[in-house]
Image (cartoon, grey):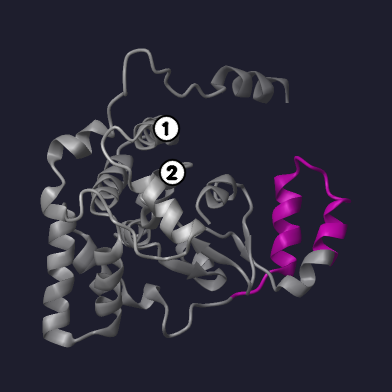
Amino acid sequence: MGGGAGLSVHGSFCIATEKTVFAIPEVLIGSHPDAGASYYLSHLPGHLGEYLGLTGGRLSGEELLACGFATHYIPSARLPLIEEQLRTLAVHDFSAMETFLAKHSEHVYPNENSILHRVETLNKCFGHDTVEEIIGALESEVAETNDEWCISTLKKLREAPPLSLKISLKSIQKARFETLEECLKREYRMSMRMISRQISNDFCEGVRTRLVEKSFAPKWDPPCLEQVTEEMVNAYFERISVDEPELELPNKLRKASHANV
C-alpha cells in the first residue's frame, strides 16, 4: 500500500497471491499519491488510476494481474518453495527467472464483483477534468441507476479532503505527460508543500483522526470543494522557496552501476 507499492511495482517481476491487497490511500489522510504513484496510476487502462488515487480503492491479486501491475500470480502456499529454489538461479538471468516463475504461476481472473468489470461506468465518471465534474457524473449515474458502486464511491469522495482530491487529480493528469523521474521530483515538491502546512493542515489532521485517534471525524481545511481555489492547488506544484532544495535522484550513480555490469 502507498509507498510500499511504489517500492515494488516497478520491479521486473511482481508476484501477486490470493492474500495480496493493493491500494493508494494517501488522499484519505490529506496527502496525495506519492513514491511514483502518480506515474504508474496514470499508465493504467482508461481512468482506473484516477479512481484508485482519489478513493483509495483496493485491488486484489487477481485484479493486479489483470491490469498489469503483477507479472505473475502464485498461491501463497508455494512461496517458501519458490524462495528456496530462487537461490539456485543466476541473479541477472532474466530469461531463466521468467521461465522459473511461469512454471509456478497460475492463470486467474477477477471475480464478478471486480471494479475491472465496471470499466465503462468508471471511465464515464472519472474521465473528467475536475473533481466537481467527476462527482457530478457519479450523481447522475446514481439518479439514473441507483447503482451501489456509484453510491459508495460518492461517499468516499465526499469524506475525503477537498484539497487533496484536487491536487491528486491534477498530479495524475500531469503524470501522463511526464517521465518517472519528473513525477518523483514533482511529488517531492508537493509533499514538501504539504508538510510545511503553509496552505492547509489537512495532512496532520488526517493522520491524527484516522491513524492515531481513529475517531474518523476530521475537520478538513478547506471544508468543501467550492473553497479550494486554483491558487491553492497550483501552489503545490511550485517550490516553497528558492532556498528549498529539489529532489536529487542518483542518476549518475545508477548509470555508472549499469555500465560496470
x then y, percent, for residue 202: 33, 47
x then y, percent, for residue 203: 38, 46
**Residue 81 left/right relative to 210:** right
Location of mark 1 (residue):
188
Point out the tag, 2 or 1, that comes first from the N-terminus.
2
**Residue 137 left/right relative to 56:** left
State the image quarter where residue 83 is shown: bottom right
- Please tell me whether residue 96 is drawn above or below residue 247 in the rendered image: below
Mark 2 and mark 1 in contact? Answer it, CB < 8 Å. Answer: yes
Q: Name the residue located 19 percent from the left edge and 86 percent from the top edge.
A: 146
Residue at the top extreme of this rendering: 243
Asked if one can make out residue 159 in the rendered structure from this viewpoint, the answer is: yes
Q: Which amino acid type corresponds to the residue marked 2 in the rendered image?
A: Asp
Magenta-tinted stretch: 81-107
- Please tell me whether residue 136 is drawn above or below residue 69 in the rendered image: below
Which of the numbered marks, if any, corresponds to residue 245? none
x then y, percent, for residue 126: 23, 62
Q: Name the residue located 39 percent from the left edge and 18 percent from the top edge.
A: 244
| Gap in angstroms between the C-alphas marked 2 and 1 | 8 Å
Majority secondary structure of magenta residues? helix
Q: Name the residue located 42 percent from the left edge and 58 percent from the top edge.
A: 209
Q: Which amino acid type corresponds to the residue marked 1 in the rendered image?
A: Tyr
- Please tell me whether residue 178 is drawn above or below residue 29 in the rendered image: above
Location of mark 2 (residue):
34
Q: Residues within 10 Å of mark 1 (few under 14, many from 20)?
A: many
Q: Is residue 95 magenta?
A: yes
Indicate the secondary structure of the residue bearing disc 2: loop
Q: Is residue 208 magenta?
A: no
> 126 and 107: which one is in front?
126
> 114 and 54: which one is in front?
54
